[in-house]
Image (cartoon, helix red, strand yellow):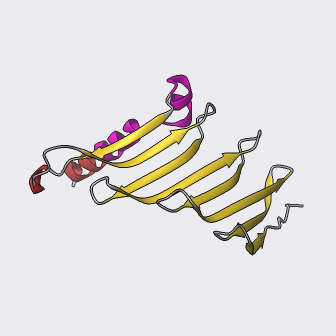
Amino acid sequence: MKYLLFIAFFSLAACHVSAQGKTEIITKGIEARKYYEQDIENGDKERYIFKEEYFNHQGEIIEIKTYKNRGKEIDEWFKYKYDEDANLVEEIELDAKGEQKERMVSIYKNGLKVEKLYYDEKDRLRQKRTYEYEYRK
């Protein structure tokens, strides 16, 4: 049992250490992180890309692309925008050609999200969510 706990602890620690946090992305000047894969067991001779992440100067993720078909086709593609307070204000899902599938806009007041608007591929409003807060007395 102690052996299993030991392995679990070091596995979790290794995962935590390998992931770059926002501070590290800023201090090291990381603009993009690309993930590659090579399935040697299935005979892959070369690696192929399966994910890309792009960051702004504040270390916030601004774009993610995932690939399928051994890196030949875009599977999912998202772009993100933030306001001056680092609030996520816009999320755009794109198709493989880079055209909008869906756009979501978040509206904040006093640092709290109060509304989220959902737009379709033609940028027509299709759904609206509102958020209300109850405060302790």
Quarter the N terminus occupies: bottom left
The range drawn in magenta is: 9-29
Residue at 18% from the left image edge and 43% from the top image edge:
46
Q: Horizontally, is 86 left or right of 43 in the view?
A: right
Determine which quarter of the picture holds residue 6.
Answer: top left
Q: Is residue 19 visible?
A: no
Question: Residue 105: image x %, image y %?
Answer: 73, 59
Q: Horizontally, is 63 left or right of 4 in the view?
A: right
Magenta span main SS: helix
Residue at 82% from the left image edge and 64% from the top image edge:
133
Front residue (pair 133, 74): 74
- In the current view of this chain or complex, which residue is farthest to the right? 137
Question: Residue 85: image x %, image y %?
Answer: 76, 41
Is residue 25 in the magenta section? yes
Front residue (pair 126, 24): 126
Residue at 80% from the left image edge and 54% from the top image edge:
112
Question: Residue 65: image x %, image y %?
Answer: 46, 52
- In the current view of this chain or complex, which residue is farthest to the bottom? 126
Q: Horizontally, is 58 left or right of 115 in the view?
A: left
Q: Horizontally, is 33 left or right of 89 in the view?
A: left
Determine which quarter of the picture holds residue 73.
Answer: bottom left
Question: Residue 115: image x %, image y %?
Answer: 79, 64
Residue at 81% from the left image edge and 49% from the top image edge:
111
